[in-house]
């Protein structure tokens, strides 16, 4: 079914595939946690590794994947690489999803079940 839904044109197959790939990338709780942290402000890999409780190499690999996908950017500051999210829409999506699920889990005091599909 194609057409106009809620004033928006139906997305192309290519756009839907790209969106699915981005959501798939964020299906990793570590990468989603990184996106959440970076939506709060820029940071270096050492601080992010401490925050996630992960190793520097593992966090660096996650950041590299997010960077290749265009979700995260970086800049050099002396010897440190500073990571940040440069897209306000991406920040909004991450904050909305994580914030909504946080409110829901607090309200029900039950973990969110994984949906099949």
Image (cartoon, helix red, strand yellow):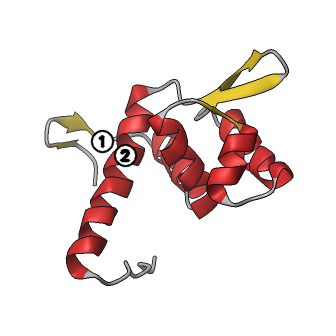
The residue carrying pointer 2 sits among few (fewer than 14), some (14 to 19) or many (20 or more) residues within 10 Å by Cα, namely some
Q: Position of residue 12 (x, y in %)?
A: 42, 40
Q: Quadrant of residue 112?
A: bottom left
Q: Position of residue 66 (x, y in %)?
A: 66, 41
The residue carrying pointer 1 sits among few (fewer than 14), some (14 to 19) or many (20 or more) residues within 10 Å by Cα, namely some
Q: Is residue 93 placed above or below 72 in the rendered structure?
A: below
Residue 97 visible, this angle: yes
User: Is 70 displayed left or right of 99 in the figure?
Assistant: right
For mark 2, what is the residue?
95
Identify the element where label 1 is drawn. Answer: loop
User: Is 88 displayed left or right of 21 in the figure?
Assistant: left
Residue at point 30%, 41% (across, down): 10
Q: Quadrant of residue 74?
A: top right
Residue 21 visible, this angle: no
For mark 1, what is the residue?
10
The N terminus lies in which quarter of the figure? Answer: bottom left
Q: Position of residue 54 (x, y in %)?
A: 74, 59
Residue at point 57%, 57% (across, down): 24
Q: Camera-side residue: 117 or 52?
A: 52
Q: Earlier in the sequence, mark 1 or mark 2?
A: 1
User: Is 34 displayed left or right of 97 in the figure?
Assistant: right
Whole-number angstrom distance, CA of label 1 to CA of label 2: 25 Å
Residue at point 80%, 48% (across, down): 61
Identify the element where label 2 is drawn. Answer: helix
Q: Position of residue 35 (x, y in %)?
A: 54, 44
Label ID, residue 74:
none
> Can you name the residue that lies furthest to the left here?
6
Residue at point 44%, 79% (across, down): 114
Q: Camera-side residue: 46 or 71?
A: 46
Q: Are marks 1 and 2 in contact (CB under 8 Å)?
A: no
Which is closer to the viewer, label 1 or label 2?
2
């Amino acid at each position: 079914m194609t057409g106009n839904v809620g004033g928006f044109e139906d997305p192309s197959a290519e756009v839907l595939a790209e969106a699915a790939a981005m959501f798939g990338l964020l299906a990793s709780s570590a990468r989603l946690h990184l996106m959440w942290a970076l939506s709060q402000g820029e940071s270096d890999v050492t601080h992010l590794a401490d925050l996630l409780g992960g190793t520097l190499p593992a966090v660096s690999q996650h950041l590299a994947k997010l960077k290749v996908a265009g979700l995260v950017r970086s800049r050099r500051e002396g010897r440190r690489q500073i990571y940040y999210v440069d897209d306000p829409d991406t920040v909004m999506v991450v904050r909305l999803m994580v914030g909504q699920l946080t409110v829901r889990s607090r309200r029900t005091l039950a973990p969110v079940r994984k949906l099949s599909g």
